Image (spheres, coloured by chain):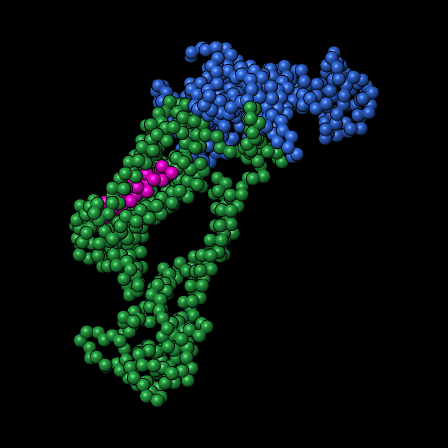
Amino acid sequence: MIYKNSYFKKELRQAYTENKISTNRKIAFALFLGLFSFALYFVFQTLQESVLSDVVPEIMQPSFFSTIYLYIHIVIAFIISYFILYYDYLFFAEIRKNSWYLLIQMGYNPVIMFFSKLLALMYTVILIYTVGFIVTIILTFLLKYTFILAYLPTLYLVGLADLLLITILSMTFSLYAKTVLNGRYWTFFTAILVFVLKTALGQYPIISNRVYMQNFSTLFNLQLSAYWLVGSVIIGTCGLICLFRSRNIAKYYNLAPDPDILPLDMEIVEIDSITGKQKVIGNKVKKGWRGRILDTATTLLLIVFICIALAINVFVIVINASTPGQEVSIRGVIPFVFSSSTMEPEIEINDLTYFQKIDAQYQIEEGQIILFEENDLLYVERVVSKTDNQLIVDIDYYPPMSQIGAMKKSINRQAVHGLYSGRSRWLGALILFANTIVGRILFLMVPAVLLFYQGQLYKYFRKDKSI
Amino acid sequence: MEHGPENIVLMENISSVEHFLVNGGKSRRVLDDINLVINRAEEWGIKGTSVYEIKLLLEIIANIRPYDKGKCVLIERGMMRHKRVILKHVFYIGSSDMLYNNMNVLEYLMFATAKSKVNKVLLQEQIFEYLIEIGLGHLSLTPNHMLNREEKAVITLIAAAYSDSQIIVFNLPEYEWDEVLIKAVAEIAKFIRKQEKTLILSTQNSFMIEKACSHTAIIKDGKLIYSGSVEKLRMTYDKIEVIIRDKTAKSMLEKLNRLLPGYNLVMKEDSLFIRSEGPGLNEPGEIHKKIIESGFIPDSIEINPKTVENAYEELILKHDL
């Protein structure tokens, strides 16, 4: 086999040792993205009767729009992870490592190398995105939703534009990041930057609107949002910055600090022979303080995640353990997941409600919502009238075509356990999610694995860092 | 091959901008008053007591760092005002990170030399055979990410040897070399010399200098204490004439001291080193005869082949006194 690699081919190969493997991995990655988006859509479907349906209806609907909308956001998160993982191969870190220095000495042209790198990365991103997009559409066909072609090109363009913006921004930042670690932070930062830009320029209300998205030209309507104009300017500017900056830094040999060769207990200073001014340029003692801060921050984050996940689990177990007569109360408050729509709009389905525990002497007023027990079951209803020891209760919401007042009944005052004091829609959705299989894995299995294998994980990342 | 001037590096009274600041605020220049002349097609090995000092010297030579005083000329051209700028005539290797990890060794060398006009089939054959010749054939299909830093450095040096640069500066004094790699560097040095190019390397390994270099410079406390041929260094400063290896050598030390006046006898583990103290005493045959006559028959007795390491130690000792 005769090796005849051009720089462009080398770039297409990315982290892999063969072009064919690289292409296969990219396709596999795209398939995974499509499948993951589809699976996530199903997870969201299990939370249909929660606050999410009100807040993000665009991903909860039974339509192609929702699966694709989810995909174009998921792909950004995964492409960013891909960029961070393979930062060394994808961006300009190689100039800092003097790989370009060697190639320029061997006759390569830095401008051609820049364009090859840019094109190869763009091609990779477009390939992964497009294949994943098609996979998501094919999978959605299995759900037999009505196929509406009109919004698909617009959604495709929205996702693609975001990815190209993130790619060019990451490339630009990589030219200024002096270490690979900093470069990886900057890459993560670009995703946040694009999110902030889209929010600030009012892009989300447009792309989450199915009617708007059926019209391709809506995206470029400056009266609705200037995101596309700003995005285009950023892409153009970053392209030029990359070209000139890469050409400029490729002219120089990059001198990386090497604390290992510094003598012990000695500082190296530059002394200006004219002014006598001293500038410290090396000191062995200072080595690694940033690394230690990062290690501590990572460990703290891990601990916080494990603690939160475990706390959620304990909370879910406590709520699920509530039985009539033995309700779990936390400082006099009974948490209760309300799984019915009978008290809408005051309490919505799957809301986490709070009831204040009351004793037998407490004066219940008409109009208050109470938690009471009847035939070993717990009910939540509103007091509509009362006599000495009897309360007449009824639900707030009767479905259409049903007889109003059919659920009205009289209960004994002694059966009342608590008085409604508030609700949390988001915690209700969280508990609902924690009770799903994915929720159990995320909140129980992941922290358990982290807890038991943290030593091995820590060693793995330490090893990776030394590389 | 174009022929330029013979004088490749000319350093006159070079002093570094960098100073060591010792506890208590006293400072001294990292390099002071360095005079060095390097000619075409020579292989220089720079060694010293401080890795930082020798690394800095080669950085100044390669226009990577500025200097404070003196004059430095490369191939009869003055130094650039802009430091670290790529110079076509100087190939600087200051780390082993230049390789691409997603290629194997042969593939990378083919990729690096892709701009040469040579037919690709012939070139690959030539590089592959060259790798075998220098003793690195076993690495030819190894992915770069599986190489250690020293192996990566040698592969970078091979690429540099194929470049058009007249001076190759191999500045990795902190690296530790095994015999296989030293042999490879020595072979590459020969290849570089054949092309009328100059190799300047920094190392703490005396064996590397012995095998790969024609000339050497030694720096101690920021000052150049030797510059010249490796041969001259070995012959002038390695005073050990004979080495005796025997477990009972220590018991014979006193007797041999009496037998060999004018020689200094030093025990190191089971070996006895016999050093000549003055001129005219370097007669290993005479020493051997006297030892045998004394009735002491050691396990092994050998004439010291004169090593750079011994010469270096002697030189440093001399300057310490």
Does residue A340 sit above or below B311 in this rendering?
A: below
User: Which hue is chain B drawn in?
Assistant: blue
- Answer with left or right where residue A119 lies relative to residue B38: left
- Answer with left or right where residue B289 lies relative to residue B108: right
In the image, A424 versus B119, the foreground residue is: A424
The magenta segment is A154-173
Q: Which x, y percent locates residue B188?
A: 49, 21
Q: Quadrant of residue A369?
A: bottom left
Q: Main secondary structure of the magenta part?
A: helix
* Extreme residue toward the front, this view: A275
Magenta-colored stretch includes residue A195: no
- Answer with left or right where residue A186 lies relative to residue B252: left
Does residue B220 sit above or below A66 in this rendering?
A: above
- Kindly tell me whether residue B189 is visible in this rendering: no
Q: Which x, y percent locates residue A425?
A: 33, 65
Q: Quadrant of residue A312?
A: bottom left
- Answer with left or right where residue A361 lies relative to residue A20: right
In the image, A26 versus B10, the foreground residue is: B10
Q: Quadrant of residue A343?
A: bottom left
Magenta-colored stretch includes residue A162: yes
- Kindly tell me whether residue A371 is visible in this rendering: yes
In the image, B183 versus A275, the foreground residue is: A275
Does residue B135 sit above or below A55 in this rendering?
A: above
- Residue at 31% over, 71% down: A347
- Residue at 36% over, 37% down: A172
- Residue at 37% over, 77% down: A419
User: Which hue is chain A drawn in?
Assistant: green
- Residue at 80% over, 26% down: B252
Does residue A42 sit above or below A359 in this rendering?
A: above
Q: Which x, y percent locates residue A63?
A: 21, 57
Q: Which x, y percent locates residue B177?
A: 56, 29
* Extreme residue toward the bottom, this view: A388
